[in-house]
Amino acid sequence: MSLFSEQEYLRYTRHIQLPGAGAAGQSKLKQAHVLIVGCGGLGAPVSYYLAAAGVGTITVVDNDSVELSNLQRQITFSETDIGKSKALCTKLRLEQLNSDINIHAVDKALSVDNAAELIQAADLVLDCTDNFATRYLINDLCKVLGKRWIYASIYQFSGQCALFNPDQSCFRCIFPSAPAGDSAPNCNIAGVLGVLPGLLGTMQASEALKLLLGLSSAISNTLMLVETDSMQFQKIALQQKSTCPCCSTEFRFNPDCADYSGICATESLSENANESASKTSVISAADFQQYHSRDDIVVVDVRNKVEHHAFNLGGLNIPLDELATSSEDINLASNLDKNKTLLLYCQSGIRSQQACHLLTAKNYKAISVEGGIVKILRHRLDK
Ligand SMILES: [Zn+2]
């Protein structure tokens, strides 16, 4: 009996010919099960290359749905996928690429409720998320369950990745606590070069394949830093920290750990936004046009001037930082009328809400558009 079907043998010829892989290596890939957490910019190339390479079982986890702004970098999706589940679209795309492998889609966020079972079932975990809370959860469970995982993150023009082994330094050794605020800056807020997740994702996929083939990984216990503006690549050997709680022999997984509470950072951000929204005046994106044309309204874009210049929905442009630094009536008086209501918008509704608080405190009548330009445009395009 052969290791492969005729079709598999033909499909994987280039691996079977490859020194270091061969038929035995390809068979290892076929038997492997990887867990890919996140189907976004990193998850797209990771899942696509691992499926193409013949990794026998792939589980993808994501609770998001596809948006138009994802298509700039999330190459597994197409325009017809907008509004659909990322996990289910990814499964379909991978099945079209390779019908000889098993793809499982979990249309939920990785959470303390499902993470242990999903990680336990996998040989290797790929972190393709965009937030610290999920990474702490993956890190801690991989430590406890003795699993290896490959981390990557991207920010504007920079990226980093590392392979963590259960008996060596961990993510908490490098990042003992999440950056200030409840989550790391993600692509929704900070922006990212479209190809960057492709670069980091293919690095993750490359190291994953080597590991599954039984070859050594060049980023094992090593942090790889990538700067695409200068094209500098740097490797830093990691040292296990004696103070790291996760690397202590006493460490036990605690599902109530506060570090996991920021999971789904963008969701919690908008939940927080809604919470404070109830204390200020907001209108929905759907009502923006109706308010926009009223005589008693002055429309103000509170994003910065570069953002305003690139695209705007009309009105004055007074950046939030100018509003924040100007004392009572300075700069504002010439432009703003206290008898009129200021209709404030920004990219996603966060800054306009902060501006709304500031202006209300200065006795202006102000309202903020929930969800900002992103929601307004989505509403227009859906019509
Ligand atoms: Zn550690």
Image (tube, rainbow, N blue to C red):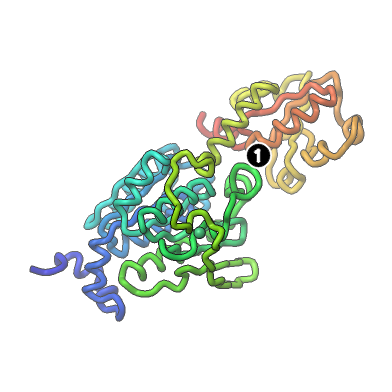
Q: Judge whether 347 appears above or below 202 on screen.
A: above
Residue under the point 50% across and 69% down: 222
Q: Residue furthest bottom?
A: 19
Q: Pick the residue in front: 292 or 325.
A: 325
Q: Is residue 9 left or right of residue 60?
A: left
Pinpoint residue 140: horizontal percent, then vertical percent.
45, 51
Could you classify mark 1 by the number of other residues whose Cα lies within 10 Å: few (under 14), some (14-19), or many (20 or more)? many
Measured as percent of width and height from the top left, residue 18 is found at: 30, 78
Q: Residue at x 65, y 39 (%)?
A: 347
Considering every residue shown, the one lying at the far front of the view is: 250
* Residue in the picture at 89% in, 34% down: 327
Residue at the extreme left of the image, as rendered: 1
Residue 21 appears in which quarter of the rendering? Answer: bottom left
The answer to whether residue 138 shows anywhere in this view is yes
User: Within 8 Å of ligand 1, the CB of disc 1?
Assistant: no
Q: Is residue 146 above or below residue 354?
A: below
Q: Residue 176 versus residue 47: which sits nearer the camera?
A: 176
Is residue 2 positioned above or below 42 on the image? below
Q: Secondary structure at mark 1?
A: loop
Q: How many marks?
A: 1
Q: Position of residue 337 (x, y in %)?
A: 86, 24
Q: Is residue 6 left or right of residue 383?
A: left
Residue 80 in view (yes/no)? no
- Residue designated by label 1: 347
Q: Quadrant of the N terminus?
A: bottom left
Residue 270: % across, % down: 58, 33
**Mark 1 belongs to which amino acid?**
Gln
Q: Nearer the viewer, residue 339 or 1?
A: 1
Quarter of the image where one finds residue 280: top right
